[in-house]
Amino acid sequence: MIRSHLDFSGLASLEEDLKQLTRAENDRVRRQGARAGAGVVRDEARRRAPKRSGKLAKNIVAVTAKVSENSRATAGVRVRERGKASDPSNAFYWKFIELGTSKLPPAPFIRPAFDAVEQQAGDAAIEKITQALDKVLTK
């Protein structure tokens, strides 16, 4: 599994605004921001994925997890791998392309996608958090 993360803990002004929200509002705002950043990475990974049938790109998805105890929202990009190999929502072979095999050289597309849009993903997350905060605080 390939893991990377973006850390926004240094944004004091956003943290102050988030403290004004209820726990549920805070969690929702953080999840929206994390999901926006993951969406940028997902789109870039889809763009970079090999295009033989299009199945691989369709199965690259952004996912959001619950907000953790320490108020961290987690979102990421993964490739669906459920069901039979012929199932349209199963691109189990992505690992062989990304990491290579004994007979196939690696052709990474997920990690380079993250590296290419890391700043844009962070900007998208901050923008979404700011929009969501404005919406909640103006109620």
Image: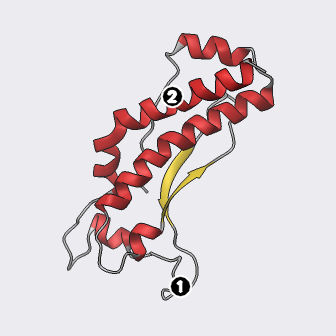
Question: What x and y, as percent, mark residue 88?
Answer: 51, 81
- What residue is rendered at 53% in x and 76% in y? 89
Question: What x and y, as percent, mark residue 55?
Answer: 42, 76
- What residue is rendered at 20% in x and 80% in y? 103
Image vertical order of residue 36 relative to residue 10, above or below: below
93 or 34: which is nearer to us? 34
Instruction: Name which residue type carries label 2.
Output: Glu
Q: Secondary structure at mark 2?
A: helix
Q: Is residue 115 left or right of residue 8?
A: left
Question: What x and y, as percent, mark residue 128?
Answer: 55, 32
Q: Is residue 14 left or right of residue 66?
A: left
Q: Is residue 19 left or right of residue 90?
A: right
Task: For the C terminus, give its image quadrant.
Answer: top right
Q: Secondary structure at mark 1?
A: loop
Image vertical order of residue 76 relative to residue 47, above or below: above
Question: What x and y, as percent, mark residue 114?
Answer: 35, 46
Instruction: Name which residue type carries label 1.
Output: Asp
Residue named by callout 1: 87
Mark 2: few/some/many CA within 10 Å (<14, 14-19, 20+): some
Task: For the N terminus, give its image quadrant.
Answer: bottom left
124 or 82: which is nearer to us? 124
- What residue is rendered at 37% in x and 68% in y? 95
- Mark 1 or 2: in front is 2
Residue named by callout 2: 127
CA–CA distance in space, label 1 to label 2: 37 Å
